[in-house]
């Protein structure tokens, strides 16, 4: 064997793959919403205020009209009248006492509650034998 034959070079080849992607429409869907109604009974505790009126006769002589006042949660409204005597005097004839009383009662009322749902339908006019795939 000669020197030329012992140094033979063999070229090596390598393949490389370059990939790409593109979007292809495979079908369409239509989304619409539906509203469903359902009757339910709602229970709630309601407050109701009313005023108790108590008239207290006094017939007291006063020099001026007493102011409206509040005592122990009771509003007292003085009522006076003038009496003609040799001199003019104010006579406190009565006080009107107002007291707020709160009562509670249960109340049930029918109400309509609406729920919205999504309906998805395939549009069969585009793409044959297409499968729905998730995008990138």
Image (cartoon, grey):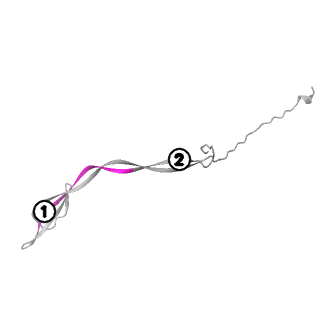
Which of the 4 image quadrants contains residue 96? Answer: bottom left
- Vertical order, 16 against 103 (above or below): above
Q: Which circle marks residue 25 in the picture?
A: none
- Callout 1: helix, strand or loop? strand
Disc 1 and disc 2 in contact, CB within 8 angstroms: no
Q: Which residue is mark 1?
A: 94
Q: Is residue 40 left or right of residue 134?
A: left
Q: Is residue 17 above or below residue 126?
A: above
Q: Going from the N terminus, do you reach mark 1 or mark 2 first?
A: 1
- Indicate the position of residue 22 as horizontal and vertical percent values: 67, 46
Return the x and y of residue 112 as percentages of the image width and height.
38, 51
Q: Which quadrant, please, contains the C terminus?
A: top right
* Farthest-out residue, right: 2
Secondary structure under the numbered disc 2 in the rendered image: strand
x and y, in percent, of residue 99 in the image: 20, 56
Question: Dot 1: few (<14), some (14–19), or many (≥20) neighbours within 10 Å?
Answer: some
Q: Is residue 23 left or right of residue 5?
A: left
Mark 2 sits on what residue? 120
Going 14% across and 61% down the picture, which residue do you hit? 95
Residue 30 at x, y percent in the picture: 55, 50
Which of the two discs, 1 and 2, sits closer to the camera? 2
Q: Residue at x 50, y 48 (%)?
A: 118
User: Magenta segment, which residues?
Assistant: 90-112
């Amino acid at each position: 064997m000669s020197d030329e034959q012992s140094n033979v070079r063999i070229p090596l080849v390598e393949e490389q793959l370059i990939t790409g992607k593109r979007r292809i429409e495979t079908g369409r869907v239509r989304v619409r919403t539906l509203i469903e109604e359902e009757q339910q009974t709602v229970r709630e505790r309601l407050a109701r205020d009313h005023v108790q009126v108590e008239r207290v006769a006094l017939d007291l002589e006063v020099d001026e009209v007493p102011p409206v006042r509040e005592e122990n949660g009771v509003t007292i409204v003085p009522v006076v009248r003038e009496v003609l005597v040799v001199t003019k005097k104010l006579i406190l004839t009565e006080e009107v006492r107002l007291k707020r009383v709160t009562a509670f009662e249960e109340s049930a009322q029918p109400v309509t509650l609406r729920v919205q749902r999504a309906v998805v339908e395939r549009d069969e006019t585009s793409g044959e034998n297409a499968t729905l795939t998730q995008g990138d």
